DNA sequence: TTTTAAAAAGGGTTTTTCCCTGTTTATTGG
DNA sequence: CCAATAAACAGGGAAAAACCCTTTTTAAAA
């Protein structure tokens, strides 16, 4: 329940000015919440948290930001301000983006087609229960758990991730080997192992896989 | 300039309720514009335009809608209500999405990081000049024209398009040849020609190119 | 330390990909 | 109509990628 009298403090990190602006106005109409400040990206958030003595309980964090995106920002927040509860904001309900964000410490995930009443509920649940997921997000998570890809597939080792990234460019395996300072034969080993595990027929398959799983961006 | 007295009418087609809601409120604060109605998608827009005798001058049209998306809706509007001026709304400033929308009859393209004053200007320009493009969009368009890809690159022949689509799967060129009922050597000719024209090093490059140019979807 | 497992690298073969070249099939201009 | 030209199509051979199996090195467990 509400800690009587004082309002819970919220910060918004989102550069979509109209959306963020109306979000701020909306939240300030809620009896139990008030917006402390509003940053355009993770960089600005860092500055504000450092300079001013602002210390919000909740941060509404947009994922798609040009300068320092939601993933990086969430990571930084988890390390430096672990007490602040992160609510991720995004247009997309892609399960891997959601999981990526949750792994980085987000306690909630809101799709941007927010209805005012839902936002109020969400903020309250975040304070009271410590977490919130919209119905759509819960569904998405449920689906992704049943098909247990996350367990088998997505625990790549650091070297494998590097290999995947490089293999999704126009580099030859020899070049990849040079960059990773490994023998071309080792690189071929990575390839062979990944192809088998992920049931891929060729490099094109790997690119498509990596894109779908958001391991790489276009 | 403003046609004295009466306000210009605007309709909003966007299912992101908070955004669309604040957009509506914002526009209604403008002296020269008023929102006639608000539809969640193209389907709903069709119904409203048919049933009610609503006839807005401008439609703010979101591209990312679940049911009937911006592209389809714009196409339908151009054919059935060519007098209504379409202003596309989107999060992304991808040049090919912009071009795709403009080709379908949009007179303007607004990125969703709208500032209130800019929206007012944009609506006025749309009425007065007949078109509006934000700075970012103009830049994007300029880039895409100067590097005249659209001319050289994107006039693929039917066979080439088929080849590109198939090559962006896990099929081998031999399999592609079978499907297209051509010799593997001919297919190889397509590959070679495309790689040279598009300056690609390998098939991975082709996949990335095709995705960027929206020739294929994930 | 010995055992075991995993990561890294090699040898050698098959298949795919790549590049240069030639042939056939349309297209066009005289 | 027929030569000239371009395009679509196809071949040979080299290079790279993919594949499979073995060996060394490194790290972790027993």
Image (cartoon, coloured by chain):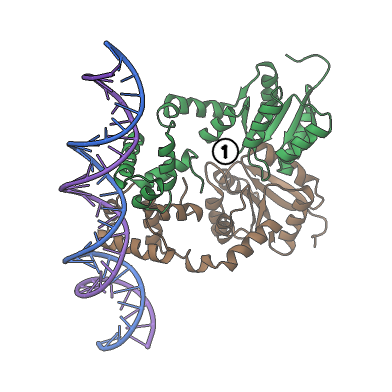
Chain colours: A brown, B green, C blue, D purple
Where is residue A55 shown, x and y percent of the image? 65, 52
Position of residue B136 relative to residue B1, above or below, is below
Q: Chain of mark 1?
A: B
In this picture, residue C29 sits left or right of residue A17:
left
Where is residue C20 shown, x and y percent of the image? 19, 37
Quadrant in which residue B44 is drawn:
top right
Q: Does residue A95 appear anywhere in the picture?
A: yes
Q: Residue at x 76, y 48 (%)?
A: A115
Where is residue B54 shown, x and y percent of the image? 81, 29
Position of residue C11 relative to residue B111, above or below, is below
Q: Which structural element holds mark 1?
A: loop
Q: The N terminus of chain B appears in which quarter of the rendering?
A: top right
Q: Residue at x 32, y 45 (%)?
A: B183
Where is residue A218 shown, x and y percent of the image? 46, 45
Q: Does residue A134 appear anywhere in the picture?
A: no
Position of residue C6 relative to residue A189, above or below, is below
The residue pinned by badge 1 equals: B92
């Amino acid at each position: 329940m509400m800690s009587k009298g004082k309002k819970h403090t919220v910060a918004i990190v989102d550069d979509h000015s109209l959306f963020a602006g109306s979000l701020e106005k909306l939240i300030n109409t809620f009896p139990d919440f008030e917006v402390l400040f509003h940053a355009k990206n993770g960089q600005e958030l860092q500055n504000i948290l450092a300079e001013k003595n602002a210390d919000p309980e909740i941060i509404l964090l947009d994922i798609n930001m040009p300068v320092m995106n939601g993933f990086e920002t969430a990571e930084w927040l988890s390390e430096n301000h672990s007490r602040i509860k992160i609510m991720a904001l995004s247009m997309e309900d892609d399960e891997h983006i959601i999981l990526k964000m949750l792994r980085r410490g987000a306690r909630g995930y809101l799709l941007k087609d927010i209805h005012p009443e839902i936002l109020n509920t969400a903020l309250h649940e975040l304070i009271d229960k410590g977490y919130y997921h919209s119905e759509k997000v819960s569904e998405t998570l449920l689906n992704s758990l049943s098909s247990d890809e996350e367990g088998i597939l997505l625990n790549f080792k650091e070297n494998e991730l590097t290999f995947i990234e490089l293999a999704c460019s126009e580099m030859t395996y020899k070049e990849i080997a040079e960059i990773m300072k490994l023998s071309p034969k080792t690189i071929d080993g990575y390839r062979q192992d990944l192809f088998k595990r992920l049931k891929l027929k060729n490099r094109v398959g790997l690119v498509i896989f990596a894109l779908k799983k958001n391991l790489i961006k276009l």
